């Protein structure tokens, strides 16, 4: 519309200016004509009374003079006539304009002396009149007096106003017609062909067969479409070839890598598009408080850590909440951008949420309701009706954003986590052909706990629209099956591990999530220098270093960890001055009161315990409360003799796996909570119950004092597990399972 206005507006302005100038000239011309006409009329009248007036003035015959001026009494436009004597005094005047007598007329003297007639517009009462004065001369050319004829000019203005009106109406009609014609021309010549071409591109992009949508138009647009059709064809042929090669390669039994996952995706999904949906985006643009410039960070999130390598390998589209304060500056008109910024591999589509939506859906329902509900940490879940309504609204908003992107051919949608329990159902209502999987990254509680949720049935109902639901461990799958069995009418198939409801089957499987093993590309650049710098900065030289890396969350057991370190130093004071615990802690969900309180609680506890045990410059805890990039975390992992993961409850916990993955020399020991999903796989870790501070303190001592040989063996075993069961294997298992369910 703006474009059309830009095109039409200058034309309209020019037409309006031309017509206005033309109108003014026309009015002027008409006005001159009318004045001319008036002058002619008044002169004729004055000259017609000339003789009679001369008689009356020569004979000073007032009777004749009055009869003469009285003749004009009843005329319509001719207002009247005045006869003046040679002194310029009124001799006789038409009664109707008797008031004219009072008007000052300085020009009479000039006329009497010059003996020349005068015509002019004069003001009389509130209106304008035309006055024509003719000197009356005798035979010797002496002035006997004057005759003045007064004409009403208002009719002239009526005519001129009428003319203006007609010109204005013509102007409006013309402007309207030109506008409409220009619009139609613009539409026919530009908008319609572009719309056709856009529709065609859209169909092509959605994977619809190009011949069905081929552009018939000849000319430049037709040529452009034909070129794109050729590219489409080449792409299809190339994809097919890659897919066949891929089938051959994945048959080989080798370690899962990015390339192998890429092959599997080509082989299993073919041309079908792959979509990931999560709340947290993999790349966030934020304004740096110091420099004021926008920078791109990877949020501290297990979901991001796990899913980003998959999208890097397979390509596709990731739909997520654009939560960064500079996010809007980096997207195109469809809210999309290519990521990672330094090496574009896939598309990120950002969905914008208002403060109210984020508050109700994310902070409220998801993180004050579902998060504590699913984690056994004895933090009471809060369910508010308003949050639930917002949660439903945001699920619908994400659904709309995804539907806009889905191609025509049955796509694969991979939903992440507890933020989107209703999404699959909403998508399926519009696109029953989509194959949908949901991965639940946190634990699933037992049915008794889940029934606390007032919206339990709607949540289970929404989730069962998925074709596949994945959990980290079998125990969570069992809990889910039991919950569904207990809460809704369905058939649980314990052989197949599926739930059948209204002829719809949902497969439930455990897929223990992992990492890609390299801890990001830039991380490899970190060298001994970075480690030496950290050792120096925090005075770690010659010390036994334990490390903790977490989002600040009550499920991560950070408080228990500090209490255990305190107890460890109380119980084993020989380690004073020799042991340092470094905690990297990224604040998260800080708008929630519980998290706010937790941050203050940890600050206070660290302060208190450091004060209690400190000796000279030594203090037992280095607490680094901020976000670290992956490259910055890596040297801490490398220098950590021990890594402590003490979650009170955790779906998996990727920190444990990240720590193991960097220990290339098989050094280090992992102290791992038995309430993490990771503890089911990493059985060579030193297992702890984080609630038992005594046992926890002893585990730290065990980790320090464990014979090197045993430590190395344990680390070797764990490294084998992490490198074999990496994120590519995880994604491969899900994609294989999904493609087996794929719609025709
Ligand atoms: P999270 O609860 O986020 O994930 P986790 O699996 O430990 O927990 O992953 C945290 C990620 O954040 C790690 O990649 C870690 O390196 C990073 N991180 C931690 N502290 C950081 C800091 N200070 N700065 C920057 N980054 C930091 C959820 C579930 C988990 C599950 C994952 C994946 O709660 O149980 O393992 O999803 O499914």
Image (cartoon, rainbow, N blue to C red):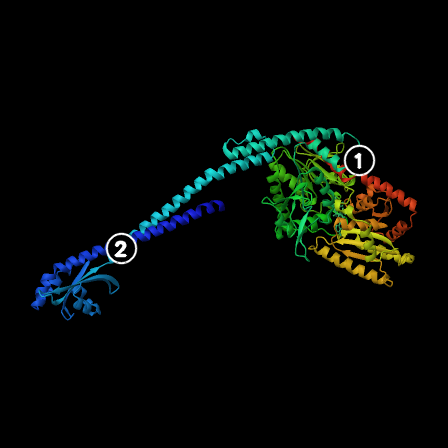
Vertical order, 498 against 549 (above or below): above
Q: Which of the 4 image quarters holds residue 37?
A: bottom left
Observer-nearest of 494 and 349: 349
* Label 2: which secondary element: helix
Disc on res. 255: 1
Along the line of sight, the residue nearer the viewer: 642 or 689: 642
Q: Quadrant of the C terminus?
A: top right
Crowd tier of the residue under label 1, counting other residues whose Cα lies within 10 Å: few below 14, some 14–19, many 20 or above: few
Give the x, y percent position of residue 21.
35, 52
Q: Residue furthest left?
A: 59
- SS at circle 1: loop
Q: Is residue 468 above or below residue 443?
A: above
- The answer to which of 341 and 657 lies nearer the viewer is 341
Q: Position of residue 158 (x, y in %)?
A: 27, 55
Q: Is residue 467 left or right of residue 562?
A: left
Q: Nearer the viewer, residue 269 or 259?
A: 259
Residue 510 visible in rendering: no
x, y percent for residue 175: 39, 46
Give the mark nearer the N terminus: 2 vs 1.
2
Residue at 16% across, 68% down: 112
Task: Give the crowd class for mark 2: few <14, some 14-19, many >=20 residues within 10 Å.
Answer: some
Q: In the rendered image, which quarter is residue 135 located in?
A: bottom left
**Cα distance, mark 2 to mark 1?**
98 Å
In the image, 145: left or right of 341? left
Residue at the image position 9 percent from the left and 62 percent from the top: 52
Q: Which residue is mark 2?
A: 31
Query: Are the residues at dot 2 and dot 1 in contact (C-beta closer than 8 Å)?
Result: no
Q: Position of residue 168 (x, y in %)?
A: 34, 50
């Amino acid at each position: 519309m703006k474009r059309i206005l830009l095109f039409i507006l200058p034309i309209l302005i020019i037409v309006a200016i031309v017509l206005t100038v033309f109108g003014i000239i026309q009015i002027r011309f008409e006005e001159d004509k009318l004045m001319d006409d008036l002058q002619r009329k008044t002169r004729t009248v004055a000259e017609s009374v000339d003789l009679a007036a001369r008689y009356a003035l020569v004979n000073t015959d007032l009777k004749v003079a009055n009869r003469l001026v009285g003749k004009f009494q009843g005329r319509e436009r001719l207002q009247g006539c005045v006869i003046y004597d040679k002194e310029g005094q009124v001799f006789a005047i038409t009664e109707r304009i008797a008031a004219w007598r009072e008007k000052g007329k300085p020009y009479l003297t000039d006329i009497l002396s010059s003996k020349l007639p005068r015509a002019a517009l004069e003001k009389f009462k509130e209106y304008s009149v035309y006055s024509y004065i003719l000197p009356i001369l005798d035979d010797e050319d002496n002035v006997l007096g004057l005759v003045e004829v007064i004409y009403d000019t208002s009719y002239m203005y009526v005519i001129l106003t009428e003319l203006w009106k007609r010109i204005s109406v013509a102007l409006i009609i013309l402007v309207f017609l030109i506008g409409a014609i220009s619009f139609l021309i613009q539409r026919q010549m530009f908008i319609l062909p572009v719309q056709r071409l856009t529709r065609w591109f859209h169909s092509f992009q959605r994977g619809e067969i190009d011949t069905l949508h081929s552009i018939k138009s000849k000319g430049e647009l037709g040529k452009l479409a034909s070129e794109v059709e050729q590219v489409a064809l080449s792409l299809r042929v190339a994809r097919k070839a890659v897919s066949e090669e891929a089938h051959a390669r994945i048959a080989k039994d080798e370690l899962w890598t990015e390339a192998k996952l890429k092959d599997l995706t080509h082989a299993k999904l073919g041309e079908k598009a792959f979509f990931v949906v999560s709340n947290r985006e993999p790349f966030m643009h934020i304004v740096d408080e110091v420099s004021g410039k926008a920078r791109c960070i990877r949020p501290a999130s297990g979901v991001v850590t796990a899913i980003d390598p998959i999208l890097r390998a397979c390509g596709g589209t990731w739909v997520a909440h654009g939560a960064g304060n500079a996010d809007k500056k980096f997207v195109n008109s469809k809210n999309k951008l290519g990521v990672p910024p330094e090496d574009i591999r896939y598309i990120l589509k950002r969905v914008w949420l208002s403060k109210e939506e984020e508050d109700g859906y994310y902070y409220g329902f998801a993180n004050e309701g579902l998060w504590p509900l699913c984690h056994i940490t004895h933090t009471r879940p809060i369910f508010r009706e308003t949050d639930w309504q917002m949660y439903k609204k945001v699920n619908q908003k994400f659904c709309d954003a995804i539907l806009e992107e889905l191609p025509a051919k049955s796509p694969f949608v991979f939903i992440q986590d507890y933020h989107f329990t209703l999404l699959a159902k909403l998508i399926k209502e519009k696109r029953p052909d989509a194959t949908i999987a949901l991965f639940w990254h946190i634990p699933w509680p037992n049915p008794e706990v889940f029934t606390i949720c007032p919206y339990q049935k709607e949540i289970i109902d929404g989730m069962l629209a998925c074709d596949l639901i994945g959990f980290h461990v079998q125990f969570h799958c069992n809990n889910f099956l039991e919950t569904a069995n207990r809460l809704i009418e369905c058939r649980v198939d314990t052989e197949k591990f599926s739930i059948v409801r209204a002829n719809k089957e949902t497969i439930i499987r455990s897929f223990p999530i992992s990492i890609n093993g390299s801890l990001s590309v830039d991380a490899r650049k970190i060298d001994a220098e970075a480690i030496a710098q950290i050792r120096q900065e925090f005075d770690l030289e010659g010390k036994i270093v334990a490390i903790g890396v977490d989002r600040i969350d009550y499920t991560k057991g950070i408080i228990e960890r500090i209490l255990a370190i305190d107890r460890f130093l109380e119980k084993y004071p020989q380690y004073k001055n020799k042991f340092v615990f470094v905690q990297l802690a990224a604040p998260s969900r800080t708008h929630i009161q519980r998290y706010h309180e937790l941050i203050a609680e940890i600050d206070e506890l660290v302060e208190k315990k450091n004060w209690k045990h400190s000796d000279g410059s030594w203090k037992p805890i280095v607490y680094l409360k901020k976000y670290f990039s992956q490259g910055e975390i890596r040297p801490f992992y490398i220098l950590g003799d021990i890594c402590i993961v003490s979650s009170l409850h955790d779906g998996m916990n990727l920190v444990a796996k990240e720590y193991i993955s960097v220990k290339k020399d098989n050094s280090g020991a992992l102290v791992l909570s038995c309430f993490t999903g990771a503890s089911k796989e990493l059985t060579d870790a030193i297992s702890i119950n984080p609630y038992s501070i005594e046992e926890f303190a002893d585990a730290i001592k065990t980790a320090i004092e464990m014979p090197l040989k045993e430590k190395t063996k344990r680390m070797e075993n764990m490294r084998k597990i992490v490198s074999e069961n990496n994120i590519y294997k995880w994604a491969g298992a899900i994609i294989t399972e999904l493609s087996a369910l794929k719609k025709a």
